[in-house]
């Protein structure tokens, strides 16, 4: 429906038939802030998407309209500079396609979709993927999938200023229906684990608190991890990232590591172990144990990594005595956005009412609640 209306709007505006690209957001079941430490993550693409209509402009000029925002951007392929806000995701992707040697030409684009922006579902990676993949298709560039993910990440680092890991872009590109991705962020190899439990839903509760990852805290966490690594390296040169560290190793050098850095590093080491363990539980269908690890992950993010907030903590706290909830935790970079919950279908309605009632009472705003389906990664639709 949305696709058809986007196509019509595009035809009215640019008078040419577009290529239509669907680009999903992502959830992450467990493994937060582990990606840039070369650890493990367990994300999946979900049915909250960005859709983009694209056609060649026949010149050097690019014109882009973002329907939901009521904003537009234009630039020339030969002179790309940084812009404002969302423009940088698109400009950055085009810049890095070019820089990687791809013969990119001018284009018209129209953006729509239903993914909530700044809610921890990675609308940014969805936007990057829509353009890296979409332009590769449009101009028949055959950019390899891993490079598409990297181009999105480069855009984020250089144009947006967030030194993010690769998880979000990877899930957007490699997502598979009803499967979660167990990604090793060092080797960049993945395996798929089926996630099709007919009795359970992945439910996202949106605090509607808008995080701003770019606003430094994310980059500070990354720096603290690097600081920990550089201290450990003095004693263990083989430690290239926190992936190579253990709790015992951190403990051994506790005197040398500043307390905050120690706490951050310990979280990452423990979270990595949780992801590996969680993957096994998932494969064995032991959802109860899986859920316990989700709660442990949340506590680590709240107390050790300190990227949660009052609203996220309350949403998780509310689930603790709910029999229909298997596990819950904050998801994504933090400081707002969504919690991810695994909820039994029989209790879904009660769960939604309960959360809505209590959250609204405490924060005077209604949370948004979505049931997420795991879908394919970015693709073109006929
Ligand atoms: C953001 C980043 C990811 C990842 C998560 C935290 O979503 O884009 O690379 O670091 O935060 O797990």
Image (spheres, helix red, strand yellow):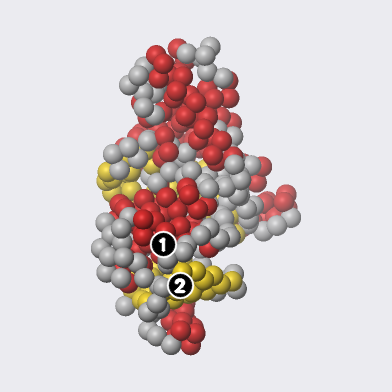
Compared to 266, does 188 lie above or below? below
> Residue 191's x, y, as percent?
27, 46
Compared to 343, does 279 lie above or below? above
The circle on residue 94 is: 1
Instruction: Check disc 2: other Cα within 10 Å, few if <14, some if 14-19, many if 20+.
Output: many
* Closer to us: 34 or 53: 53
* Closer to us: 367 or 176: 176
> Residue 375's x, y, as percent?
36, 61
The circle on residue 77 is: none
Q: Is residue 335 visible?
A: yes
Mark 1 and mark 2 in contact (Cβ < 8 Å)?
yes
The circle on residue 62 is: 2
Determine the residue located farthest toward the front in the rendered image.
78
Instruction: Check disc 1: other Cα within 10 Å, few if <14, some if 14-19, many if 20+.
Output: many
Q: Secondary structure at mark 1?
A: helix
Q: Going 52% across and 74% down the picture, which residue do you hit? A: 65
* Closer to us: 230 or 271: 230
The CA span between labels 2 and 1 is: 10 Å
Q: Is residue 289 left or right of residue 193?
A: right
| Mark nearer the N terminus (2 vs 1) | 2
Q: Secondary structure at mark 2?
A: strand
> Residue 106's x, y, as percent?
40, 72
Compared to 344, does 54 lie above or below? below
User: How many marks overall?
Assistant: 2
> Residue 58's x, y, as percent?
37, 79
Q: Is residue 82 left or right of residue 235?
A: right
* Closer to us: 184 or 340: 184
């Amino acid at each position: 429906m949305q696709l058809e209306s986007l196509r019509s709007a595009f035809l009215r505006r640019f008078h040419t038939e577009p290529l239509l690209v669907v680009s999903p957001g992502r959830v992450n079941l467990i493994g937060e802030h582990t990606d840039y430490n070369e650890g493990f993550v367990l994300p999946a693409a979900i049915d909250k998407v960005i859709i983009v209509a694209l056609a060649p402009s026949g010149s050097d000029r690019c014109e882009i309209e973002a329907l939901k925002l009521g904003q537009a951007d234009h630039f020339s392929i030969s002179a790309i500079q940084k812009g404002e806000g969302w423009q940088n995701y698109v400009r950055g992707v085009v810049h890095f396609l070019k820089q990687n040697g791809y013969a990119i030409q001018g284009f018209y684009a129209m953006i729509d979709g239903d993914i909530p922006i700044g809610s921890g579902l990675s609308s940014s990676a969805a936007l990057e993927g829509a353009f890296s993949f979409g332009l590769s298709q449009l101009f028949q560039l055959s950019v390899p999938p891993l490079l598409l993910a990297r181009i999105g990440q480069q855009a984020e680092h250089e144009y947006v200023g967030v030194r993010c890991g690769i998880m979000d872009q990877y899930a957007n590109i490699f997502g598979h229906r009803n499967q979660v991705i167990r990604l090793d962020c060092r080797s960049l190899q993945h395996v798929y684990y089926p996630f099709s439990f007919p009795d359970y839903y992945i439910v996202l509760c949106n605090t509607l608190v808008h995080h701003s990852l770019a606003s430094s805290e994310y980059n500070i966490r990354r720096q603290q991890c690097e600081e920990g690594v550089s201290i450990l390296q003095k004693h263990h040169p083989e430690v290239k990232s926190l992936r190579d560290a253990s709790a015992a190793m951190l403990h051994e050098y506790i005197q040398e590591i500043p307390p905050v850095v120690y706490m951050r590093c310990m979280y990452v080491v423990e979270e990595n172990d949780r992801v590996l363990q969680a993957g096994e539980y998932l494969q064995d269908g032991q959802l109860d144990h899986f859920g316990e690890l989700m709660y442990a992950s949340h506590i680590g993010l709240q107390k050790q990594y300190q990227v949660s907030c009052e609203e996220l903590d309350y949403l998780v706290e509310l689930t603790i005595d709910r029999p229909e909830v298997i596990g819950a935790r904050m998801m994504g970079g933090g400081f707002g956005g969504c919690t991810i919950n695994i909820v039994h279908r029989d209790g879904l309605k009660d769960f939604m009412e309960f959360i809505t009632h209590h959250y609204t009472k405490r924060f005077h705003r209604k949370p948004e609640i979505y049931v997420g389906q795991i879908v394919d990664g970015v693709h073109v639709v006929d």
